Image (spheres, helix red, strand yellow):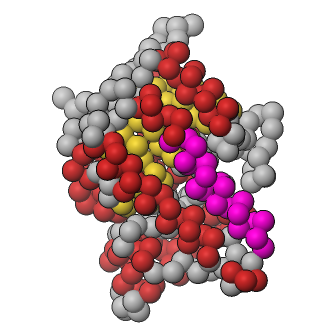
């Protein structure tokens, strides 16, 4: 009989789980049985600078617990979900504030005594991206803010959470970014964006070397062309009619739902031999080939290959050939 909760008993922290890939990863970890602490800056009481009030960490935590119940069976009325049944716990935190991050880690230590999976999905800098200006023309404050959100916050979180993660052998650190070591060899079109999205790849390489000494694993993981809530809004579509967005951007045909990268994370975390990937940069499409999972529609979009060969390389092939 297939184990529907391969991560039962595991404790995870998804830093930056308000929406998009972070939310989907938290939910799928819960579906797989993990107890998941979800953090972010947007709550039902306050909204971050991203300005999307409808997506909150409380909602994410509720979705995690619902997925855990659906996968592992409901608890008795009034009974709290047991560790291992898939439970979401929302903790508001600005990961640029070391004291707030320290408080999150202290709570996990106090309540669980362990941390098995750390997902650094901190970002929230879409509104700062400027692909039209050279460095000498760019807004310096906006660029440095992007580095704060996508690099400095990752460093603070790893520094403060890793002491708990390495307490037991087998811990997994996942740095979520945009692109792989291979695809990010080409300039990303914005000085600050390029630095922000390349840094987590190097973080995984460096921390992989350090974690290997204590039996841990670090990787970077990228989705392909992600159909996040913000991206769907940008194209004026929903997940149900997302293909209508192809008329506005033909390369949207290779896009994937957040579920795809979330399934990639769970497959990796459930693999007892995941250390073979230590220090490397991985993609949702690449891991789908490795583990055999699919996106919600049953396809396996390989955005990395499509972008390299078609969008950049000019090969005359349809996106469907890469799904």
* Residue 293 placement (x, y as % from top left): 30, 52
Say which of 123 and 151 sits in front. Answer: 151
Please state, as top left, top right, bottom left or bottom right, where the C terminus lies in the image: bottom left
In percent of the image, x 78 and y 52: which residue is there? 49
* Residue 245 placement (x, y as % from top left): 60, 73
Is residue 153 positioned above or below 113 on the image?
below
Report how many numbered discs are placed on residues in the image: 0
Q: Main secondary structure of the magenta part?
A: helix
Tell me if residue 157 is in the magenta stretch. yes
Q: Is residue 128 visible?
A: no
In percent of the image, x 39 and y 81: which residue is there? 308
Quadrant in which residue 280 is drawn: bottom left
In percent of the image, x 32 and y 54: which residue is there? 279
Quadrant in which residue 193 is drawn: bottom right
In percent of the image, x 65 and y 54: which residue is there? 149
Is residue 291 positioned above or below 146 on the image?
above
Say which of 260 and 139 sits in front. Answer: 139
Say which of 11 and 285 sits in front. Answer: 11
Is residue 72 positioned above or below 296 on the image?
above
* Residue 73 placement (x, y as % from top left): 40, 20
Please state, as top left, top right, bottom left or bottom right, where the N terminus lies in the image: top left
Q: Which residue range is magenta in the image?
A: 139-158
Tell me if residue 48 is in the magenta stretch. no
In this rendering, would 269 be left or right of 92? left
* Residue 25 placement (x, y as % from top left): 47, 44
Is residue 221 positioned above or below 131 on the image?
above
In this rendering, would 144 be left or right of 212? right
Q: Is residue 195 visible?
A: yes
């Amino acid at each position: 009989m297939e184990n529907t909760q391969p991560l039962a008993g595991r404790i995870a922290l998804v830093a930056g789980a308000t929406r998009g890939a972070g939310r989907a990863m938290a939910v799928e970890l819960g579906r797989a049985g993990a107890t998941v602490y979800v953090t972010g800056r947007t709550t039902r009481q306050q909204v971050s600078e991203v300005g999307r009030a409808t997506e909150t960490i409380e909602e994410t935590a509720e979705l995690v617990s619902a997925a855990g119940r659906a996968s592992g069976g409901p608890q008795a009325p009034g009974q709290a979900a047991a560790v291992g049944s898939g439970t979401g716990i929302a903790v508001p935190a600005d990961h640029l504030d070391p004291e707030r991050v320290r408080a999150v880690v202290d709570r996990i230590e106090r309540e669980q005594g362990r941390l098995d999976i750390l997902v650094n999905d901190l970002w929230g800098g879409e509104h700062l991206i400027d692909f039209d200006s050279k460095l000498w023309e760019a807004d310096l404050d906006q660029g440095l803010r992007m580095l704060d959100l996508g690099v400095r916050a990752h460093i603070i979180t790893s520094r403060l959470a890793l002491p708990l993660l390495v307490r037991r052998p087998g811990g997994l650190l996942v740095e979520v970014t945009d692109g792989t070591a291979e695809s990010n060899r080409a300039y990303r079109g914005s000085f600050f964006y390029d630095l922000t999205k390349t840094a987590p790849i190097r973080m995984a390489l460096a921390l992989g070397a350090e974690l290997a000494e204590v039996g841990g694993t670090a990787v970077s993981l990228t989705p392909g062309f992600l159909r996040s809530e913000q991206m769907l809004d940008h194209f004026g579509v929903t997940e149900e009619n997302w293909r209508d967005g192809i008329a506005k951007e033909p390369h949207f045909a290779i896009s994937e739902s957040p579920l795809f990268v979330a399934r990639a994370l769970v497959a990796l975390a459930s693999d007892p031999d995941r250390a073979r990937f230590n220090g490397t940069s991985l993609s949702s499409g690449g891991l789908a080939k490795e583990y055999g999972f699919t996106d919600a529609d049953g396809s396996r979009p390989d955005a990395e290959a499509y972008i390299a060969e078609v969008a950049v390389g000019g090969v005359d092939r349809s996106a469907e050939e890469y799904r």
